Amino acid sequence: MTDKVSIVIISHSPDVASGTAEMVRQMSGQSVPVAHVGGDFEGGLGTNVEAIHQALEEVYSDLGVLVLYDLGSAEMCAETAMELLDVEKQKHVVISNAALVEGAVLAGAVSAGGGSLEEVKSAAEQNTESYTNHKTPEDSWESVTICHEIGLHARPAVRFTEMAKGFDANIRIKLDVHKEWVDAKSIVRVIGLKARKGQVLNLQAEGNEAEEAIKNLISFVENNFDEDKKDLS
């Protein structure tokens, strides 16, 4: 039994389905169970209820399964496939109309961080209402320049938020080019910064471990998110 929320990706195109699933695995690691279904019975464009049902069974978790699809007919097939599951399992499967590729990547990131099914679904749909921008005093923060060639992309963003969650502190970050501070423990907000190489990341924290949190997060950024150059992709 997996300890992460699972993701099922459905597309009319086999290539889109497999490519999206691979992106999730690359960005979120192997801890998130991901299944993909693409094409009809003959391998052409279309959908396949039986294959979707098999995918749901393959990665099923009591923690939840998020289903993402590309077009309306795929949603209908997903609903039909869900009905083939045991009634108890159906309660733990949710279908989302989030954008397929972006939604899957965000969902995978939140799942990798231990998010609940509701949090994973919210991330996929970029429902950031529960994450409030913070206006804070402008006279006290630490800064670090992002040196990583790709910037603060999804994979290190997951690790960044996981590190932030490990400290007993409220941590906020923003780029120099932005006015609003965001929650450093929110994967949706961190990825949403779209922080690129050369940009300056500002960090603020308050709480019992505020100083330690800032020190460790800055070190993480300065060390290229602890990624070797061979890992850049």
Image (spheres, rainbow, N blue to C red):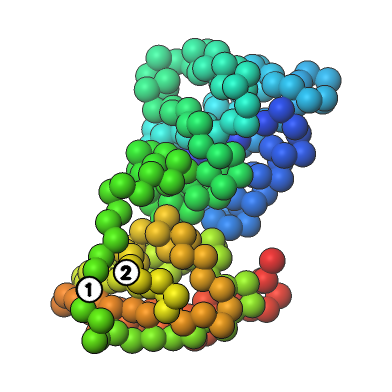
User: Would you identify the image quadrant in which residue 136 lies?
Assistant: bottom left
Q: Which residue is mark 1?
A: 136
Q: CA distance from mark 2 to mark 1?
A: 7 Å
Q: Position of residue 214 (x, y in %)?
A: 32, 82
Cβ atoms under marks 2 and 1 closer than 8 Å: yes
Q: Amino acid at mark 2?
A: Trp
Q: Position of residue 149 (x, y in %)?
A: 64, 77
Answer few, some or many: residues within 10 Å of disc 2's Cα (few below 14, many 20 plus, some between 14 and 19).
many
Whether residue 105 is visible: yes
Task: Give the x, y percent position of residue 92.
Answer: 39, 28
Which one is nearer the viewer's eye here, 195 or 66?
Answer: 195
Residue drawn at point x = 83 percent, y = 20 percent = 42
Q: Quadrant of the C terminus?
A: bottom right
Q: Nearer the viewer, residue 62 or 141?
A: 141
For numbered disc 1, what is the local secondary structure? loop
Question: Is 90 positioned to the left or the right of 208 in the image?
Answer: right
Location of residue 15 by image quarter? top right
The image shows residue 79, relative to residue 57, as above or below, that is above
Comes first in the chain, label 2 or label 1: 1
In this image, 92 relative to 209: left or right? right
Quarter of the picture holding the N terminus: top left
Give the image location of residue 177, x and y in percent.
44, 75
In the displayed structure, would residue 135 be above or below residue 124? below
The secondary structure type at the circle numbered 2 is loop
List the residue tagged with mark 2: 181
Residue, x 32% and y 69% (percent of image)?
A: 181
Q: Amino acid at mark 1?
A: Thr
